[in-house]
Image: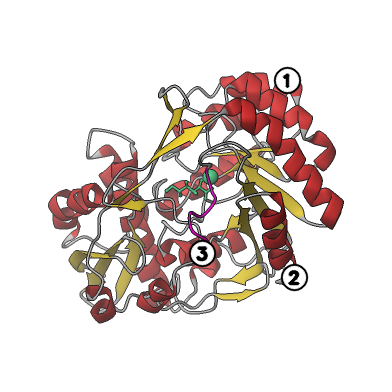
Amino acid sequence: MKIVSAEVIITCPGRNFVTLKIRTEDGVHGLGDATLNGRELAVASYLRDHVCPMLIGRDASRIEDTWQLLYKGAYWRRGPVTMSAIGAVDMALWDILGKSTGMPLYKLLGGASRTGVMVYGHATGRDIPEALDEFARYAEAGYQAIRIQSGVPNMRSVYGVSKGGGTYEPATKGRVDEQYWSTEKYLDFAPKLFEAVRERFGFDHHLLHDAHHRLTPIEAARLGKAVEPYRLFWIEDPTPAENQAAFRLIRQHTVTPIAVGEIFNSIWDCKQLIEEQLIDYIRATLTHAGGITHLKRIADLASLYQVRTGCHGASDLSPVCMGAALHFDLAIPNFGVQEYMGYPEEALEVFPHAWTKDGGLMHPGEAPGHGVEIDEKLAARYPYDPAYLPVARLDDGTLWNW
Ligand code: GCO
Ligand code: MG
């Protein structure tokens, strides 16, 4: 199973994706997702210039040893660029192992622990009535878990709501968009949004919401406490998590469950959050947190503390990541929920996939490996198109957390 080539493919079918393709001497290939939204070329260069040459000649079945080599061997540890590059290699090697043994990835991970993967969709609206109508559409489509985001009255922009109708896409082509934020307005509004959902739809659905790192710990505690009657499945990223101990303060005040970790890239980012049971769901992903090998380690640690997974599944993680994530979700014992934001049609064409979707339940399929391929000819028709995530400022211009 000697590796003979490793190449990076960059394509923009609706949005930018970076894919690593590793090939062995037996003609088997594996794919890994290396997309880091807004910093795509940094990971592409890390792979092309530093990692790919190291892979040639190595045994593709030595997945753990390759992970350790890339992690310890760089000397400089962790970080989103390094860990996304390692994640892509790891995903591709597991894909190769699946293909060369004829097994779908979830079987290599121990087999199915459930019949399907519960995914949540994004209901968004410029105001409460519009958000509720979107919620109704997801409910009718069979989703058991639905995230809701809405525009806030008298606030110029808000996280998670699409600009001109259509699907939500946070990155803006060619520039860094400036948005505005007011915690006071948001905190006044958010409980009304959840109240309206429960009034119209009752308590049958799992209700999720993303605060997108905007609050201070005490503000997050206030929000969690205020929304307890609406029994949310989770509030996501209530406050930035670099300071893990900050979550103690939130926990002292509220039983609203908390999900954190889409921007984490290693077990060290969430060790304290998990060990002190300061969160309920860990959102780290395969792509950004070092692939299957490392996310499994995080999930196993989490399982000791009854913390479940809720992997990030925004459309800026490629379908390759989604396919691999569905295998992971199906196999691990402490799966909670998987985000599925969906993809532009052209992205689904560039990445043919074995997964299936039935309402709010997904299945990775039975194809060997992770079951996602890339149509390279089609991919070449969509050249890289730089796009960046926005920043948020307070009304007086102070730069805030987006
Ligand atoms: C989510 C996330 C995304 C991120 C995006 C950044 O919960 O899905 O918060 O919307 O903002 O993935 O690239
Ligand atoms: Mg989020």
Report if residue 123 is visible in the image.
yes
Q: Dot 3 lies on which element?
A: loop
Residue pictured at 60% horizontal, 22% vertical: 217
Mark 1 or 2, closer to the camera: 2
Disc 2 residue type (three-letter): Glu
- Residue 46 place in picture, x, y as percent: 20, 48
Determine contact: label 2, label 3, CB under 8 Å: no
Residue pictured at 47% horizontal, 67% vertical: 343
N-terminal-most mark, 1 or 2: 2
Near-viewer residue (264 or 13)? 13
N-terminal-most mark, 1 or 3: 3
- Tell me the residue that label 3 is attached to: 166
The quadrant where residue 258 appears: top right
Disc 3 residue type (three-letter): Gly
- Tell me the residue that label 1 is attached to: 252
Is residue 160 covered in magenta?
yes
Magenta part, dominant SS: loop
Does residue 215 appear to the left or right of 291 in the view shown? right
The residues colored magenta run 159-166
Report if residue 232 is visible in the image.
no
- Residue 331 place in picture, x, y as percent: 60, 61
Q: Is residue 157 above or below residue 23?
A: above
Callout 2 crowding tier (Cα within 10 Å): few <14, some 14–19, many ≥20:
few
Q: Dot 1 lies on which element?
A: helix
Does residue 290 appear to the left or right of 367 in the view shown? left
Is residue 346 covered in magenta?
no
